[in-house]
Image (spheres, grey):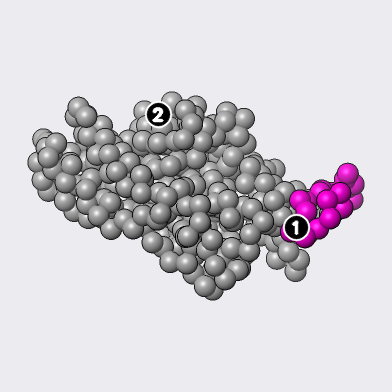
Amino acid sequence: MSSADRNGCHSTTIVFPLPPGEVPGEAIMQTFDHIRASDARDALARLGQGMESRIIAGGTDLLPLMKEGLLAPVRLVDLKPARALRYLRIEADGALRMGALTTLADIERSPEVAARHPILVQAVRDAATPQLRALASIGGNLLQRPRCWYFRGQFDCWLKGGADCFARDGQNQYSAIFDGGQCVAVHPSDLAPALVALEASLTLQGPSSSRTLPVADLFASPEEYRRVEHRLGADELITEIVVPRQPDGTRGVYLKMMERQAWAFALVSAAAALTLREGRVERARLVLGGVANIPRRALAAEQALEGQMLTPELVAQAAERAVAAAQPLQHNGYKVPMARELMRRAILQAADLPF
């Protein structure tokens, strides 16, 4: 049920799941205000009006979090009317600029992106169903929360403010193989590893100023005082993502292993962007997904490749280095050889060499 006032403020009632201990059949009703923002500054002003507020764009993660009882905002600030934040264009300097409201489907369907950065098309085309790709914004995709069933379920896990990470000694077949601290949930975004491999940057807009930082620096493993996987301020919005022109001779590849044939979150993914000169690796950017709290740069693997003539043996050594620091849990040891092989194949495919 909803009603609207003259200012475009909609009061909406939704039903949340029952928390542990509640008697079945007792519906829990939560009301919230739905406000349409005209642009980023309007949205930030609405956020700063003293009540528990959240930005909503595609809503493909926010609404499930609300339905699962993980969030109960008093106000939703709808960014979708801010059409100026939905664009995708190639600049004169070769950079790809994308507004934060650009959807995964916009990337998938863009011939310019397919020609210049096929790694991005590869990353988004199996990220979700076509319906969800048409709704999901790239800003929201980068900020989506983990799919760990202890976090999403009715458990007082560490990431939700509890004392323990139940996945560490529990059902952890989908959890991290690189230790990020108190939490072993993995980052679910497919787009994030590809953007990190392309050394993309983003713009964060605050109430009075903006700042730019590498996409890689947006992500951070949760800590005691910050139980979230990013460094976005509570009063900031992602407004733009920029992929710089890649050096001549650069090719990028994104590979993903899923439990189902398509439209599932990655068990493991690998993004590789290589710059080659006459068979020698001039630059390597290698990133693993589905293995840690955040997209994981395989720095040791990059160092093994850079400056070297590319051979199958060298690629195998680099792939081994990519997983050398892995610390698998009881039920997810399979991810180690999977990540090693996926990285090996991504490097070879980026170099246009046979597997």
Q: Reply above or below: 35 against 124.
A: below
Compared across the picture, whether 35 is left or right of 325 comes to: right
Question: In percent of the image, x 49 and y 31: which residue is there?
Answer: 260
Q: Under tag 1, what secondary structure?
A: loop
Magenta-highlighted residues: 1-26
Camera sees residue 322: yes
Where is residue 37 drawn, in percent x and y? 72, 50
Where is residue 64 drawn, in percent x and y? 67, 46
Q: Under tag 2, what secondary structure?
A: helix
Q: Is residue 199 magenta?
A: no
Q: Disc 1 marks which residue?
A: 19
In this view, the residue in front, 259 or 12, is 259
Q: Disc 2 marks which residue?
A: 114
Compared across the picture, whether 328 is left or right of 8 comes to: left
Where is residue 50 drawn, in percent x and y? 75, 69
Question: In percent of the image, x 17 and y 41: which residue is there?
Answer: 315
